Amino acid sequence: MSIVNSDGLGQFQLDNTTPHASRVATKWLQEHSSGFRHFHCPPKSPDMNIIKDIWNALLHVVEKRSPPPRTPTDLLTALQESWCEFPPGYLQTSVESMPHRVAALLCVRGGPTRY
């Protein structure tokens, strides 16, 4: 977090899915989170996480490649090239969707949303 958000304004977002809420993960977070802010999401609510959507879009593009990546190096290259091919504004649009995601999540009281 200190590298990514050197200004101290960033927040660590955790979606509280089962692997992220394990004893090991919880203990690590308690021991290491004094240096950054932690955004608390409703339990098991990945609906707030735009990273999931971005990874899915990136995976979709990489899966369409011909020939498909066969080695870890090929996969890394494919991911990097695909990332650079995202349309301008794609990430900004995802970030700007957050108020709508929060509102939708509040409307369903933490349940599933269309996101």
Image: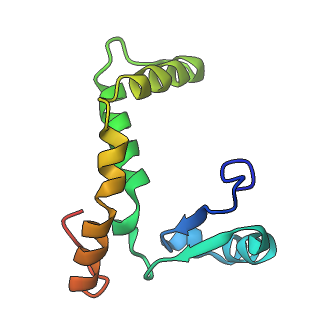
Q: In this view, does 19 lie to the left or right of 67?
A: right
Image quadrant holding the N terminus, namely: bottom right
Q: Residue drawn 37% across and 36% down?
A: 59
Pick the residue in front: 78 or 67. Answer: 78
Residue 61 image-quadrant placement: top left
Coordinates of residue 21 in the picture (x, y in percent): 58, 76
Q: Residue furthest bottom?
A: 109
Coordinates of residue 77 in the picture (x, y in percent): 52, 18
Asked if 47 appears above or below 42 in the picture, the reply is above
Q: Residue drawn 72% across and 52% down?
A: 6
Q: Residue drawn 28% across and 58% down?
A: 97
Image quadrant holding the C terminus, namely: bottom left
Q: Which residue lies furthest to the front in this view?
A: 7
Asked if 22 appears above or below 71 in the picture, the reply is below
Residue 69 image-quadrant placement: top left
Coordinates of residue 91 in the picture (x, y in percent): 37, 43
Q: In this view, does 86 lie to the left or right of 30?
A: left
Q: Is residue 113 left or right of residue 8?
A: left
Asked if 45 appears above or below 69 in the picture, the reply is below
Q: Residue furthest top?
A: 67
Total residue callouts: 0
Pick the residue in front: 79 or 12. Answer: 12
Pick the residue in front: 62 or 39. Answer: 39
Q: How is the image coloured?
A: rainbow
Asked if 55 appears above or below 18 in the picture, the reply is above
Q: Residue drawn 40% across and 43% down?
A: 55
Residue 35 image-quadrant placement: bottom right
